[in-house]
Each structure stands twice: as structure tokens, then as C-alpha cells.
Amino acid sequence: MERNAKCPSCGANLKQKICPYCGYEMYIPNPNQQATAAKVDPKAKYEFEKEYSKAASIVIDGIRNCKFNLGFRGYDIGQVDRFLDELISNIYYHGNYNNIKMVLDGGAIENVKFEQSIRGYDIRYVDVFLDKVIEDIKVLSRIKEKY
């Protein structure tokens, strides 16, 4: 951020991207362009965070509490558990209202491949569960698009 930047809304001297007085967020797409300002509506931000965090916590709780039956030939237990842990860590809201990042989308979940082992998680149960998670991810994406 340039040293003597002024907020276009209230005229305050800015030392960071978001004005602490009026909530304007400075956006600088590249160094050759001049800064533009976009006001972040605090009420919309609050509503979004409330709705998204509620939905995300339900999805995360569902993943954490899932139990799979063991089968004679099933998916490798360690691989499935690691994938679900990674999925949980990538669902949560990263804190930037204008740029939400969900590293794993429905396509990445559909294309995941697990090795089979002699004693592992029952393949049918894992596949059905991942289909449900894909639907939940789509709900989170719709919430994101709504705001």
C-alpha cells in the first residue's frame, strides 16, 4: 500500500487495505492502475458469516462423526481418514469476505481414488458418504454465491 493513501469515503489516512473508520476496502488490481474503493456492507458480511459458518459446521461435524463398516476388500483406512481430515481443513471459512477459498470442490471429491486393502472401509459406504459430502459442498457454494 502506498504511504500517504487516503480513504476515498472519509479521507482518513490509510496504513492498511481496509479503512478502520468507514469500512471501505481498497482494491489495487496491479501497480500500474489507480486504487478503487468498494464498501463492504457490514450487515451483509455478518449475515454471510452467520449462514456460512452454521452450514460449514454442520458439514464438518458430519464428516468428523462418520463411521464406516469394515469390509474384507475395502478402501485403505489411512488414506480415507487422511482425505477426510484434509477435506475438513479446507471447508472452513478463511476469513476474507471478498475472497473465500475452498480448495476442494465437488469435482476433486468425485475424482478421488483410494487404494484397496484386505481389511478396509466398505467401498459402498464410503462412496455414498462422499456423494452426500459433494451435495453439502454444493450447498456451501450456493451460500457463497448468494452474497
Image (cartoon, helix red, strand yellow):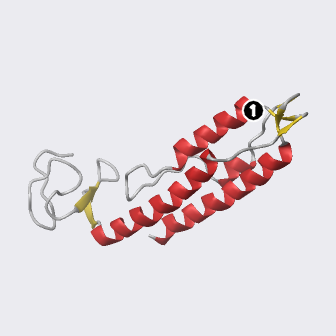
The quadrant of the picture occupied by the C terminus is bottom left
Residue depicted at 60% across the width and 38% down the height:
85
User: Residue 137: x and y, percent?
Assistant: 61, 58
Question: Height in image: 127 above or below 51?
Answer: above
Nearer-the-camera pick, 48 or 40: 48
Residue depicted at 56% across the width and 44% down the height:
88
Residue depicted at 63% across the width and 60% down the height:
136
Q: Is residue 21 shown left or right of residue 74?
A: left
- On the question of residue 41 being in view, the answer is no
The amino acid type, in three-letter code, at marker 1 is Ile
Q: Is residue 103 shown left or right of residue 111?
A: left
User: Residue 87: x and y, percent?
Assistant: 60, 44
Q: Quadrant of residue 86?
A: top right
Residue where numbered disc 1 is placed: 77
Q: Quadrant of residue 73?
A: top right
User: Residue 12: x and y, percent?
Assistant: 8, 59
Residue depicted at 66% across the width and 38% down the height:
83
Count of numbered tags: 1
Mark 1 residue element? helix
Question: Height in image: 125 above or below 26?
Answer: above
Nearer-the-camera pick, 31 or 108: 108
- On the question of residue 106 being in view, the answer is yes
